[in-house]
Amino acid sequence: MRFSEFSGKEIVNLDNGERVGVVSQSDLEVHPESGEIESIILPGTGFLGLGRKRDDVVIPWKAIRKIGPEMIIVELKQRGLARE
């Protein structure tokens, strides 16, 4: 899959059905030697970029359960994989 296909997809948490963020608003953490994606980093911003800044949400690549045409399903709560 190319990054252009990956960009713009919504990330949804399987455990509670909540929208976590959008890939186009995120950064990817890439292993420097292998080039493999290790995690997706979603910036923590306030509503419309205003207000109190929240902590970044880091989604490990191993938390991804399914990549569909419009969204990415991740499992964060049960495995305690979300780190801030």
Image: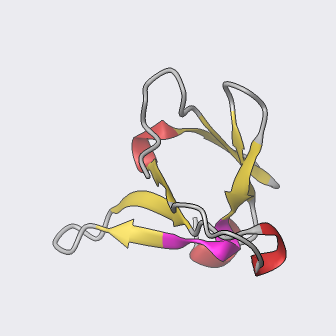
The residue lying furthest to the left in this view is 33
On screen, 28 above or below 17?
Answer: below
The residue under the point 43% across, 24% down is: 79
On screen, 30 above or below 40?
Answer: below
User: In the picture, residue 52 is in which quadrant?
Assistant: bottom right
The residue under the point 58% across, 74% down is: 3
Q: Is residue 37 left or right of residue 13?
A: left
Count of marks placed on residues: 0
| Residue 59 in the image, given as x and y percentages of width and height | 48, 50
Secondary structure that dominates the magenta span: helix
| Residue 12 in the image, given as x and y percentages of width and height | 72, 43
Given residues 28 and 34, the one toward you in this image is 28
Quadrant position of the N terminus in the picture: bottom right
> Is residue 68 on the magenta stretch?
no
Given residues 64 and 41, the one toward you in this image is 41
The residue lying furthest to the front in this view is 52
On screen, 18 above or below 42?
Answer: above
Q: Is residue 15 left or right of residue 36?
A: right
> Is residue 26 on the magenta stretch?
yes
| Residue 75 in the image, given as x and y percentages of width and height | 57, 32
Colouring mode (rainbow / by chain / secondary structure / one colour): secondary structure
The residue under the point 43% across, 29% down is: 80
Q: Is residue 65 left or right of residue 33?
A: right
The span picked out in magenta is 23-27
Given residues 18 and 63, the one toward you in this image is 18
The residue under the point 16% across, 72% down is: 33
